[in-house]
Image (spheres, helix red, strand yellow):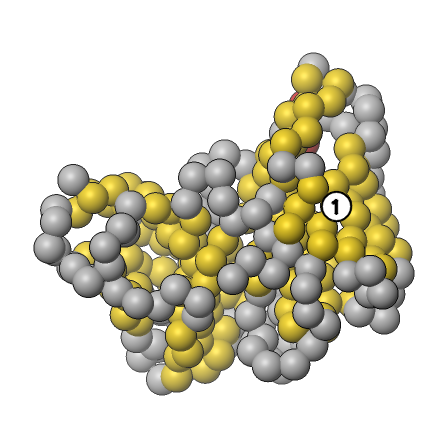
Amino acid sequence: SQQGEEDPQALSIQEGENATMNCSYKTSINNLQWYRQNSGRGLVHLILIRSNEREKHSGRLRVTLDTSKKSSSLLITASRAADTASYFCATVAGTGRRALTFGSGTRLQVQP
Amino acid sequence: DGGITQSPKYLFRKEGQNVTLSCEQNLNHDAMYWYRQDPGQGLRLIYYSQIVNDFQKGDIAEGYSVSREKKESFPLTVTSAQKNPTAFYLCASSIGLAGGTDTQYFGPGTRLTVL
């Protein structure tokens, strides 16, 4: 089952603009992670935010988490053509199995 | 180089054949995972293993089998019982329950096509 749902499914912006992607999930979580996937490749971990955290930064990435709304957002500032990829949120449940459940992803296209 | 490798990169299977996808890691991770990805979709968990000689079914285990005889290796067999096996298969590993973060490291994937 898909725990997370990303919004939008696809996003096209110009280089230099900011890109915001949203993720909603259904059950209580231990942590939420964002991954990036270039076309035809494996996933790369970007950032992890725990359920007791509200905001986290890493370079040009900013992640927020609202557990009351069961939602998270990923902001990429000053986007570059090299940021073109699919971005997935993934959650680890608060109880039960310790495996990631992925959303369906946002395909980001950054136009040079 | 430390990392996680998958082979082959491309695999073609005839109807009714079993095929085995390889996944090896030298990160000394306890946990390993297999995912399936269909075009334009997210990842769905097939099987996972938290420790050697133990593994658990994920969300779509039917038609697949795994083994975990060594810490470094977690091969996936796609059996003839899997009715629609054409997909991109991704293997991942993580430190495991002792690590506390669940961050996963992914291999480059194997693209399986049924002829």
Where does residue A44 sit, x and y in percent of width and height?
A: 59, 49
Q: Nearer the viewer, residue A25 or B85?
A: A25
> For mark 1, does the 10 Å Cα neighbourhood hold few (<14), some (14 to 19), or many (20 or more) residues?
many
Taking A21 as reference, is B2 left or right?
left
Q: Nearer the viewer, residue A52 or A28?
A: A28
State which quadrant residue B95 falls in. Answer: bottom right
Indicate whether B75 appears above or below B3: below
Residue drawn at the location 63% of the way across and 32% of the way down = A10
Residue extending farthest to the top is A112
User: SS class of the residue under badge 1?
Assistant: strand
Taking A111 as reference, is B51 left or right?
left
Residue drawn at the location 82% of the way across and 60% of the way down = A69
Indicate whether A78 appears above or below A73: above
Q: Quadrant of the C terminus of chain A?
A: top right
Residue drawn at the location 45% of the way across and 82% of the way down = B51
Where does residue B99 sit, x and y in percent of width and height?
A: 64, 76
Q: How many marks?
A: 1
Q: Nearer the viewer, residue B62 or A97?
A: B62
Chain of the residue on which disc 1 is drawn = A
Amino acid of disc 1:
Asn
State which quadrant residue A38 falls in. Answer: top right
Does residue B71 appear in this view? Answer: no
Where does residue B19 sit, x and y in percent of width and height?
A: 19, 57
Taking B96 as reference, is A40 left or right?
left
Residue that mark 1 sits on: A22
Residue drawn at the location 59% of the way across and 81% of the way down = A96
Where does residue B106 sit, x and y in percent of width and height?
A: 50, 55
Taking A51 as reference, is A100 left or right?
left
Residue extending farthest to the right is A54
